[in-house]
Image (cartoon, rainbow, N blue to C red):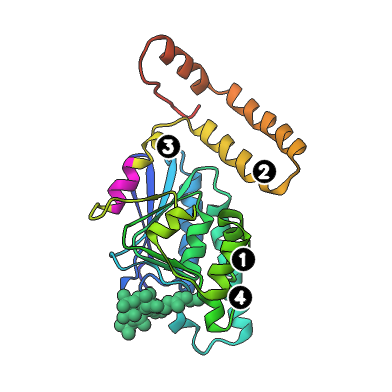
């Protein structure tokens, strides 16, 4: 059996999922998608994990998209099944109650950018490039790109990227709001990301999760219903001992120590 194409390591309360297929520029094969599903479920179920970082091996590619070598010779039905795997296997990360962060260490093309779009936050290395070139290959983004990209960068910019196959540099992606941050030139991206997300790693998990779900809900609802749902999510935090710990810490002029309870 092939070694897992995705490696799980932990740094404190942060789980790191690294695509380990550098020789194929971390392209998404069937096994890679299945590994994301399996390891994603493991991370979400692990009470010690407060955030999940997704990255790729090496410094050239975060992920070059679908494994085009594997796809050669696939029938349309095979491709349909494969495209279905993006939805079924990445959905645990998409709906993760813990923040998921993409550390984009190089090119993120096609399904690779779509994987990053599933994440809640995106940090790019200064040399990263981002694109959805599918229409230049006679297909369209099939792993959520046509739906998630316009929600993040707006309709006009999403159409520009998808119809022109436009490639963005990390800096342009930052200007368009497609990534939250670009790591300083020459910096170790993973260390930069781990440092940047310290407020999450050391934060109050019940509040983090409630905030994530409240924000995600806002895209699927009216403002009135969204405000009602916000009240329900707020209520979850009222029942947590972490809320009381934050109040105690404030009174005692110290940093709170959150336990996730
Ligand atoms: N699927 C499978 N293998 C891939 C791949 C993919 N999506 N992308 C790259 N590879 C393989 C190459 O075939 C090559 O293998 P080889 O050494 O057996 O020839 C190896 O990875 C290195 O690729 P190379 O092009 O030499 O590396 P690079 O660093 O110069 O460029 C990319 C990397 C990702 C920019 C370039 O390979 C590329 O544009 N790939 C296609 C990406 C794409 O169109 N994805 C969207 C699919 S919808």
13 versus 91 height, above or below: above
Of callouts 2 and 1, which one flags the residue occurring earlier in the amino acid sequence?
1
Query: Is residue 131 one of those drawn in magenta?
Result: no
Regarding mark 2 in the picture, which secondary structure is present there?
helix
Regarding mark 4 in the picture, which secondary structure is present there?
helix
- What is the crowding at mark 2: few (fewer than 14 residues within 10 Å), some, or many (at least 20)? some
Is the CB of mark 2 within 8 Å of ligand 1?
no
Where's the N terminus, which quadrant? bottom left
Q: Which residue is mark 4?
A: 81
Q: Is residue 153 visible?
A: yes
* CA distance for labels 3 and 4: 36 Å
Q: Which residue is mark 2?
A: 218
Q: Nearer the viewer, mark 2 or mark 4?
A: 2
* CA distance for labels 2 and 4: 30 Å
Q: Which span is picked out in magenta?
A: 189-195
Q: Are marks 3 and 4 in contact (CB under 8 Å)?
A: no
Q: Is residue 23 visible?
A: no
Q: Position of residue 29 (x, y in %)?
A: 46, 74
Q: Residue 69 versus residue 35: which sits nearer the camera?
A: 69
Regarding mark 3 in the picture, which secondary structure is present there?
helix
Of callouts 1 and 3, which one flags the residue occurring earlier in the amino acid sequence?
1
Is the CB of mark 4 within 8 Å of ligand 1?
no
Q: Which residue is mark 1?
A: 146
């Amino acid at each position: 059996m092939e070694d897992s194409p995705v490696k799980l390591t932990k740094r404190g309360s942060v789980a790191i999922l690294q695509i380990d297929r550098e020789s194929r520029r971390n392209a998404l094969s069937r096994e890679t998608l299945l590994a994301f599903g399996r390891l994603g479920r493991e991370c979400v179920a692990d009470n010690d994990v407060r955030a999940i970082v997704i990255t790729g091996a090496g410094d050239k590619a975060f992920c070059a998209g679908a494994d085009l070598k594997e796809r050669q010779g696939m029938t349309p039905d095979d491709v349909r099944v494969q495209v279905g795997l993006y939805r079924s296997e990445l959905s645990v990360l998409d709906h993760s109650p813990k923040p998921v962060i993409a550390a984009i260490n190089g090119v993120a093309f096609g399904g690779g950018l779509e994987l990053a779009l599933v994440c809640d936050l995106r940090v790019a290395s200064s040399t990263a490039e981002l694109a959805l070139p599918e229409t230049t290959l006679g297909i369209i983004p099939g792993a959520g790109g046509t739906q998630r990209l316009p929600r993040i960068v707006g309709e006009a910019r999403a159409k520009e990227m998808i119809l022109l196959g436009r490639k963005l540099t990390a800096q342009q992606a930052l200007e368009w709001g497609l990534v939250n941050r670009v790591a300083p030139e020459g910096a170790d991206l993973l260390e930069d990301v781990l440092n940047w997300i310290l407020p999450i790693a050391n934060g109050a998990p019940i509040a983090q999760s409630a905030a994530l779900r409240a924000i995600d809900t806002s895209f699927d609802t009216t403002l009135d219903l969204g405000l009602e749902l916000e009240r329900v999510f707020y209520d979850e935090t009222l029942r947590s001992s972490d809320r009381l710990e934050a109040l105690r810490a404030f009174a005692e002029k110290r940093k709170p120590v959150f336990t996730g309870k």
